[in-house]
Image: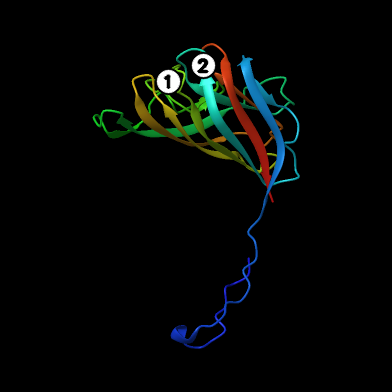
Amino acid sequence: MSIVKLNNRSVKDITAFGSISSLGSLTHIATQTASSSASISFTSGIDSTYKEYIFYFINIHPADYSEFHFNLSADGGSNYNVTKTSTFFRPTHRENGADGSIAYGTGGDLAQGTGFQPLTQALGEVAVDNDASASGYLHLFNPSGTVGVKHFIAKVQHMHNNDYSMDSFVAGYGNTTSAIDAVQFKASSGNIDSGDILLFGLK
């Protein structure tokens, strides 16, 4: 990234700025749309092309009151069982203005666990009302690397089944030096009725 240069010695006399180079650009890789789907899997497009991949979740609507989860694969999607350690916290606020809080989400974190990582957490199920859904993003860093662990961060906003606005913050790492080449999303119970998941690479 180039440094922003002022072309005049005195700030009050500035008439022009030097150029600012781009930090990078997003490249759309794939979009999958849920339709009563048991899971949504991305088994291609995650490779050494990009150092960072971003998944965007748009209006994920579950069939049942359920959490929204993901897991990682190091074998092209044959198994979703990468060992993960993570942390989870959530602020909440109810539609009637009550019960505003922020809390660490025990049960939403993993300690060397191979199961699915919650993106919305127990006591934080996504509602099934017609107007309810979850939206947010997941960043996966350098998944094709074969030296370090595979860091991820995520933020998901959803309508809770008791009419809360609930914002989930998740971060952690896949504790493997193997390349991650597939990611799967699913509800903790039942299908994903509708919604889109978009995959982008960050250059």
Instruction: State which quarter of the image contains the N terminus.
Output: bottom right
Q: Nearer the viewer, residue 124 or 97?
A: 97
What amino acid is at disc 1? Answer: Glu
Q: Whole-percent x and y of residue 6?
A: 54, 80
Residue 176 located left or right of residue 84? right
Task: Identify the secondary structure beneath mark 2.
Answer: loop
Mark 2 nearby-residue class (10 Å; few <14, some 14–19, many ≥20): many
Give the amino acid type for the residue marked by disc 2 in the picture.
Ser
Residue 131 rendering spot, x and y as whole percentages: 45, 23
Q: Is residue 121 left or right of residue 60?
A: left
Residue 20, above or below 121: below
* In this rendering, position of residue 83 left or right of residue 32: left
Q: Secondary structure at mark 1?
A: loop
Image location (x, y in percent) of residue 188:
51, 16
Q: 25 or 117, which lies in front?
A: 25
Vertical order, 116 against 177 (above or below): above
Q: Are marks 1 and 2 in contact (CB under 8 Å)?
A: yes
Q: Which residue is mark 2?
A: 188
**Of tags 1 and 2, which is closer to the observer?**
1
Give neighbour class at mark 1: few <14, some 14-19, many 20+ (Cα, 10 Å).
many
Q: Residue furthest front?
A: 130
Q: Quadrant of residue 78?
A: top right
Identify the disc placed on residue 125.
1
Above or below 9: residue 135:
above
Q: CA distance from mark 1 to mark 2?
A: 9 Å
Q: Is residue 28 above or below residue 74?
A: below
